Image (tube, rainbow, N blue to C red):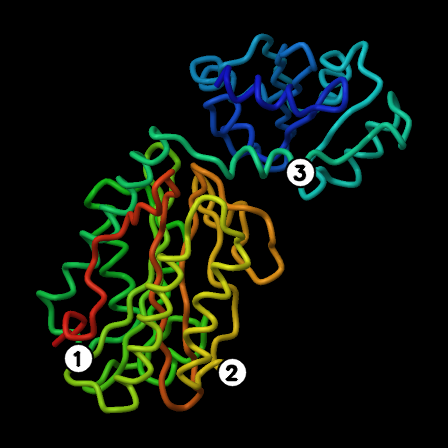
Amino acid sequence: MENKIKLLTEHMETEAVIITDPMNVFYFTGMYSDPHERLLALIVKKDGSTSLVYPALDDEAVRGTAKVDTFLPHKDGEDAFKEVFKALEGATTVGVEGDHFTFNRYKRLLEVCDGKDIVSVQETVNALRGVKDESDKEKLQEAVDITEKALHTLYDMKIEGMTEQQVSDHLVETFKSLGAVGPSFGPIVLAGKNAAKPHGDTGDTVIKNGDFLLIDFGIVTKDNYVSDMTRTFIIGEADEEQKAIYESVLKANLAGIEATKVGTKFSDVDKASRDSIEADGYGEFFTHRIGHGLGHDLHESPSVDSNNHDIIGTGNVITIEPGIYKAGVAGVRIEDALYVEEDGAYVFNKFPKKLDDMKLK
């Protein structure tokens, strides 16, 4: 945690920073708490000193977990910002998370700072969280392993005749039994024509022979790391058009993985997958970016899209998830998570993805 605070202070252009996003507070302190409507705020000064303003009702849990210098609890009914002002004493320039710090809290900050001296540090925080180390890699692998073990159980089941929701419920029950705290989202389970909706709603559609079954989901571990993967199964045998679409997505997935190297632009990774699908004549049916960052949250920095011309660096964790969504015909997405190393991309996912291996009963 000390190293993360040090990195933050090295990038700070203000005398203090206020962090209020609970997951960012966790990132810098090791303590995760949902304050609900109450105020949770980590104040970091340029000299590296840290103060945590938090609901007093969480005092025991916070003091037992958070790595900070000063604890500033506030009781219900008290003005929590008095504790913030105490922690900010002497600081006239302040950074806040532009995507999280609310307007009402901004107005309170105006009591001690001029508006021109309050700036966003969102990009800095996002960039710091976008770089992982070997410890993060190990914990992300644990999240992926639990996810894949749950998905493997489908091979032992009779899926034809089940509903999308029944498959989703089975996956949740299974991964919780394997140690997951809960889902990071979904699971999204889409059968047949529903799979042509990139983020469709899991429902009561009955899964039939000949259907594609698109499953996109992830889990949260006890250490607050998440997974995110997608596999598209076939119930029985695929027809020729289904085979063509599936093989095109698989080629694009592999092209994106191959393109993920230190020094490459994120936009070029998107282009590698997109060019592959366009060459097969399905370009109009690939309607989203190729991927996103992953870590403590499901969608983190960096974004892997055609407009992000930043350079890939060691420690970036991204997803590669091309898809083809042909309404009324078929939908396929294949998603893996990658950790970028000096000599290329380490792929967390070991789950099969060749079409012959994706057959369910």
Give, as a three-letter code, the residue at label 1: Glu
Name the residue tied to disc 2: 284
| Residue shown at the point (67%, 10%) measured from the top left | 47
Name the residue tied to disc 3: 122
Q: Are marks 2 and 1 in contact (CB under 8 Å)?
A: no
Q: Depth check: give the residue in front, 204 or 30.
A: 30
Which one is in front in this view, the residue at disc 3 or the one at disc 2? 2
Task: Give the CA separation, mark 1 to mark 3.
Answer: 47 Å
Q: Which mark is residue 160?
A: 1
Q: Earlier in the sequence, mark 2 or mark 1?
A: 1
Q: Tag 1's secondary structure?
A: loop
Task: Give the CA separation, mark 2 to mark 1.
Answer: 31 Å
Q: Looking at the picture, how far across and down is residue 170, in whole percent? A: 22, 60
Q: Earlier in the sequence, mark 3 or mark 2?
A: 3
Q: Looking at the picture, how far across and down is residue 323, in whole percent? A: 41, 72
Q: Tag 3's secondary structure?
A: helix
Q: Looking at the picture, how far across and down is residue 308, in whole percent? A: 60, 55
